[in-house]
Amino acid sequence: MVAGSGRAVEYVAGRRWEVSATGFWQAHRGAAQCYSDLVAEWSGLRPGGLAWDLYSGVGVFGSRLAEQVGPTGAVLAVESARSAVADGTAALRDLPWLDLHAQRVERWVAGQVGGAAPDTIVLDPPRAGAGKDVITALTATGPLRIIHIGCDPASFARDLALYRAAGYHLTDLRAFDAFPATHHVECLALLERPNP
Ligand SMILES: C[S@@+](CC[C@H](N)C(=O)[O-])C[C@H]1O[C@@H](n2cnc3c(N)ncnc32)[C@H](O)[C@@H]1O
């Protein structure tokens, strides 16, 4: 950043976020709206449901999930950047059943063993993907649906194989050319547990 307040204002699905200009925001201007619409379409959530939004940033996906589960439900969002958690918490005050938590996902999921099983997990890790330890911990909680998002096709494919090994089926897949002239492609996968 060369000059300015250091803050940026973004809108998605009728909601307004004021975020740090150096924090994470999707690179393509239409991406946050497009991906969050797909997350809302795939989530399968109903009022009273429980969802996790991991690597949540400022809670763009978590806000859509929270609107779906309503005040009788809960959304637990986990993000390591404290500034993103602070910005998300400020923007989403009207959704008190959405809890944005500042912690590393690998540490947080390890503490969920034996807790309530989420209906749906959304995760949008950085380029390296989620990896074996996180995916093993997530699938062990037995969610009905997992929505996995990744921008590096190689780590995304590796992560999908881990879900498959854990018994989850790939039931939908979308790819977006959101990073033209690079090898990155934004991929969104819907994984479901058979015979829930
Ligand atoms: C691809 S971004 C997704 C952000 C959000 N889903 C969105 O669409 O705005 C990945 C996010 O994961 C966070 N992150 C990276 N490593 C993490 C970790 N080990 N645990 C928790 N969050 C992490 C980054 O700070 C970043 O906000």
Image: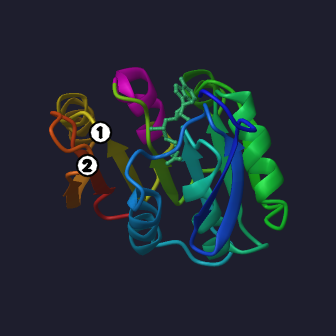
Residue 130's spot in the image, x, y percent?
39, 29
Q: Quadrant of the N terminus?
A: top right
- 127, above or below 173, in the image: above
Inspect this view and state whether residue 24 appears. Answer: yes
Could you say which is closer to the camera, residue 169 or residue 42? 42
Helix, strand or loop status at disc 1: loop
Residue 167, image quadrant: top left
Pointer 1 residue = 151
Residue 190's spot in the image, x, y percent?
30, 58
The magenta region covers 128-139
**Callouts 1 and 2 close, C-beta under 8 Å:** yes
Q: Amino acid at mark 2?
A: Cys
Q: Residues within 10 Å of mark 1 (few under 14, many from 20)?
A: many
Q: Earlier in the sequence, mark 1 or mark 2?
A: 1
Q: Determine whether the beta carbon of the residue marked 1 sits less than 8 angstroms from the nearest atom of ligand 1.
A: yes
Q: Amino acid at mark 1?
A: Cys
Residue 46's spot in the image, x, y percent?
58, 77
* SS assignment for the magenta stretch, majority: helix
- 122, above or below 20, in the image: below
Residue 75 is a magenta residue: no
Pointer 2 residue = 187
| Residue at image point 15% right, 38% down | 181
